[in-house]
Image (cartoon, rainbow, N blue to C red):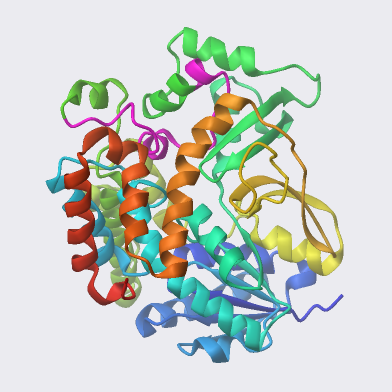
């Protein structure tokens, strides 16, 4: 085992997320002497992340070598692990475009980063950049593992597996987060939960949810929460889907509401109210993060402490879900604390370096893993990690109604990837036509016109399409 792994962060200007992952990695004694390479195109944010990395070294008493560069090829040379956390086009202009143009057509969104017209456009501008990184890796570090945290996860992983030869896994924290939320709802310690999840990213389901100490099936307790109306206000969509499907989905209600045709309808505002769906939530989250970030930077520059009341006052006026307000407040107040996160990235690196076996949930190509989903698509399943790398668990068939629901999303993913790989503009229209939310709200002429407007607004953030 080498204790000098070269771990490269692409998009390291995402300082808070990078901080969490660096703390996780260096928290393992076997990884404490690693080389951490921070790469970002934004020199200012890169410099901040470099300061944070040195601070982590000091706080944890580790001796990692810290490098920072805006040169991606320099960063990648000789890498063992490449962690990607980029956002192509940023909040402005890209994310704002993804929301504002569809809204003109009566198409409201919540998060717009995974499916729907927002997910399609995010995929189209992100996939070419990810493939550029992957092609650099093929040349400069062909044996490295590409650990991707970038949404739209399923589209990005599908394109990476189709368009490059790099070893890659896509990671998302929705599986452990939701397991903890459900454990809280049914008043069972989360460490007592044993679960089995399978599906596609953001639309995987708990096929098993039980008490590991007694073997008790805990789904009846979740059913009781629904029957008694005790579900959290922010989670009404998922509990409604559990009631209809019999299984609980891994990603949040605000996400899931825009993957299906039943909840967000511009001519039925009462549905949005009934299910407490936060329209434009991702815009508000971005605004809150920028506000909190600016406040932290100002406090550092002028050497004063930020109080909870100051953060809340700064966030007042941003239409944000209460739990997101609490999360933002907590992240600012705990900025200098280093507690292990639920992210899988450091666990993968540690297991591959030490040979210690672990189970994580990863997004991998479907090679007869879920037998009633198409081969080649990206599936999210349990994976064994050890010195041999990532070994997905064969699931077999999943319940047919769950597979059918996933297929409606896989259709959109497939056509978006087809457009990105082939450069054929026609498939962008096809992806939007088959999107469940857009199809439920818009006519074909509206979809065509909206796609044209979005492509034009993206300008050189997209490659030319034929």
Residue 293 position by quadrant: bottom left
Q: Name the magenta segment's main secondary structure.
A: loop
Q: Is residue 244 magenta?
A: yes
Q: Report the side of 46 relative to 445 (left or right).
A: right
Start-end of magenta stretch? 242-266
> Residue 436's quadrant in the figure?
top left
Tell which residue pokes out farthest to the left in this image: 104
Q: Residue furthest top?
A: 228
Instruction: Tell me where residue 344 sits by quadrant.
Output: bottom right
Q: Quadrant of the C terminus?
A: bottom left
Name the side, left or right, on which 212 lies relative to 415: right
Q: Which x, y percent locates residue 316?
A: 20, 46
Q: In this orientation, which residue lies closer to the viewer: 28 or 198?
A: 198
Vertical placement of residue 276 versus 214, above or below: below
Viewer can see residue 308: no
Q: Position of residue 308 (x, y in %)?
A: 33, 49
Q: Residue at x 32, y 67 (%)?
A: 90
Query: Left of 267 or right of it: where is 84?
Result: right
Left or right, residue 264 beside residue 386: left
The residue located at (83%, 79%) in the rendering is: 2
Q: Nearer the viewer, residue 52 or 79?
A: 79
Is residue 354 visible to us here?
yes
Q: Name the quarter where the N terminus is drawn.
A: bottom right
Residue at image point 70% right, 76% down:
144
Residue 381: % across, % down: 68, 44
Instruction: Please check the rendered image and state whether residue 307 is part of the magenta-colored stretch, yes or no.
Output: no
* 392 is higher (above) or lower (below) than 188: below
Residue 138, percent from left and from top = 64, 82
**Residue 380, placed above or below residue 336:** above
């Amino acid at each position: 085992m080498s204790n000098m792994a070269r771990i490269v962060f692409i998009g390291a200007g995402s300082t808070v997320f990078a901080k969490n992952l660096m703390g996780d990695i260096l928290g393992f004694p076997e990884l404490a002497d690693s080389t951490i390479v921070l790469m970002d195109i934004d020199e200012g944010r890169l410099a901040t992340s470099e300061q944070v990395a040195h601070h982590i070294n000091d706080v944890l008493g580790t001796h990692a070598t810290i490098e920072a560069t805006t040169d991606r090829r320099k960063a990648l040379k000789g890498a063992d692990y490449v962690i990607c956390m980029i956002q192509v086009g940023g909040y402005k202009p890209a994310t704002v475009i993804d929301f504002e143009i569809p809204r003109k057509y009566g198409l409201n969104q919540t998060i717009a980063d995974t499916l729907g017209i927002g997910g399609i456009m995010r995929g189209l501008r992100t996939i070419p950049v990810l493939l550029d990184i992957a092609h650099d890796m093929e040349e400069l570090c062909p044996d490295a593992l590409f650990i991707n945290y970038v949404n739209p996860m399923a589209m990005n992983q599908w394109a990476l597996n189709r368009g490059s030869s790099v070893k890659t896994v896509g990671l998302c924290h929705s599986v452990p987060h939701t397991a903890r939320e459900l454990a809280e709802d049914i008043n069972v310690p989360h460490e007592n939960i044993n679960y089995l999840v399978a599906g596609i990213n953001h639309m995987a389901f708990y096929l098993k949810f039980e008490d590991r100490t007694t073997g008790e099936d805990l789904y009846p307790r979740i059913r009781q929460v629904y029957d008694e109306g005790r579900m959290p206000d922010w989670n009404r969509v998922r509990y409604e889907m559990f009631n209809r499907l019999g299984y609980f989905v891994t990603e949040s209600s605000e996400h899931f509401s825009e993957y299906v045709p039943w909840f967000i309808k511009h001519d039925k505002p009462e549905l949005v109210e009934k299910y407490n769906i936060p329209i434009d939530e991702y815009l508000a989250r971005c605004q809150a993060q920028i506000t909190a970030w600016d406040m932290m930077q100002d406090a550092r520059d002028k050497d004063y402490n930020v109080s909870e009341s100051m953060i809340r006052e700064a966030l007042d006026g941003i239409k944000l879900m209460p739990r997101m307000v609490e999360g933002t407040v907590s992240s600012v107040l705990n900025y200098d604390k280093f507690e292990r996160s639920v992210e899988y990235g450091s666990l993968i690196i540690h297991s591959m370096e030490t040979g210690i076996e672990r189970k994580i949930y990863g997004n991998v190509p479907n090679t007869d893993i879920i037998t009633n989903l198409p081969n080649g698509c990206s599936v999210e399943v349990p994976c064994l990690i050890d010195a041999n790398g990532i070994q997905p668990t064969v699931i077999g068939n999943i319940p047919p109604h769950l597979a059918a629901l996933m297929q409606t999303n896989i259709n959109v993913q497939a056509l978006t990837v087809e457009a990105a790989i082939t450069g054929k503009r026609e498939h962008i229209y096809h992806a939007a036509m088959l999107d469940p939310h857009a199809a439920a709200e818009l006519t074909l002429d509206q979809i065509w016109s909206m796609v044209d407007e979005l492509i034009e607004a993206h300008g050189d953030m997209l490659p030319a399409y034929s």
